[in-house]
């Protein structure tokens, strides 16, 4: 399983939006079972709080039913993740500092996967949750394609295993019918 963590300052706007978006994209591509997706904060100022209402509203407008409680990133989370996607330079610096300078090779700015290599602006300050959604969605699509290319064998294996399980379920149903 490939561990993907999204990180922002408070874990109530950008990172939970990215978590929800990326989970849906992974499900749509049939690779969700190959991924462990979560989100965290670099700060403890919002720990335990739900997703910020305007961010939640933006997700609902886009058809997401997602609940979330903010949690702070730990050294263990950093160590165990395969990919840590941060929203801006401050998040990048904070995660690398929390890791004691180690593990920075697995930290990426989510916006760096876009052609313009942007920082994902914090809608807490900009109040532009639609823009944040668009940028996060676009970057998550590119990042998922990156993962599918880099980890093609793992994703293909995961899809193969699920297909076999589906066929086994179908065959079990046939066996039950034969018993009648």
Image: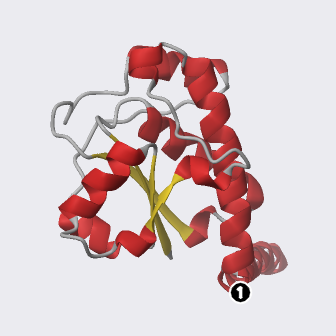
- Residue occupying image coordinates x 40% and y 46%: 89
Q: Is residue 65 left or right of residue 88?
A: right
Total labels drawn: 1
- Return the residue nearer the eye: 167 or 84: 84
- Return the residue nearer the eye: 48 or 140: 140
Which of the 4 image quarters holds residue 63? top right
Which of the 4 image quarters holds residue 69? top left
Question: In the image, residue 65 lies at what x, y percent?
Answer: 55, 30
Examine the rendered structure and indicate whether residue 92 appears above or below residue 131. below
Query: How is the structure coloured here?
Result: secondary structure
- Return the residue nearer the eye: 27 or 135: 135
Q: Is residue 168 visible?
A: no
- Return the residue nearer the eye: 58 or 65: 58
Q: Is residue 65 left or right of residue 42?
A: right
Few, some or many residues within 10 Å of mark 1 (<14, 14–19, 20+)? few
Examine the rendered structure and indicate whether residue 49 appears above or below residue 104. above
> Mark 1 sits on what residue?
153
């Amino acid at each position: 399983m490939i561990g993907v963590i999204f990180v922002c300052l408070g874990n109530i706007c950008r990172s939970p939006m990215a978590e929800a978006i990326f989970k849906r994209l992974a499900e749509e591509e049939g690779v969700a079972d190959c991924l462990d997706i979560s989100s965290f904060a670099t700060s403890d100022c919002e720990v335990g709080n739900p997703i910020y209402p305007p961010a939640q509203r933006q997700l609902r407008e886009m058809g997401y039913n997602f609940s979330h409680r903010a949690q702070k990133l730990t050294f263990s989370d950093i160590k165990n993740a395969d990919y840590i996607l941060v929203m801006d330079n401050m998040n990048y610096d904070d995660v690398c500092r929390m890791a004691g300078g180690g593990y920075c090779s697995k930290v990426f700015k989510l916006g760096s996967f876009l052609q313009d290599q942007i920082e994902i602006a914090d809608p807490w300050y900009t109040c532009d949750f639609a823009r944040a959604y668009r940028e996060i969605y676009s970057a998550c699509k590119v990042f998922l394609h990156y993962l599918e290319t880099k980890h093609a064998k793992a994703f293909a294996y995961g899809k193969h295993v699920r297909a076999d399980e589906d066929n086994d379920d179908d065959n079990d149903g046939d066996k039950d019918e034969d018993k009648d």
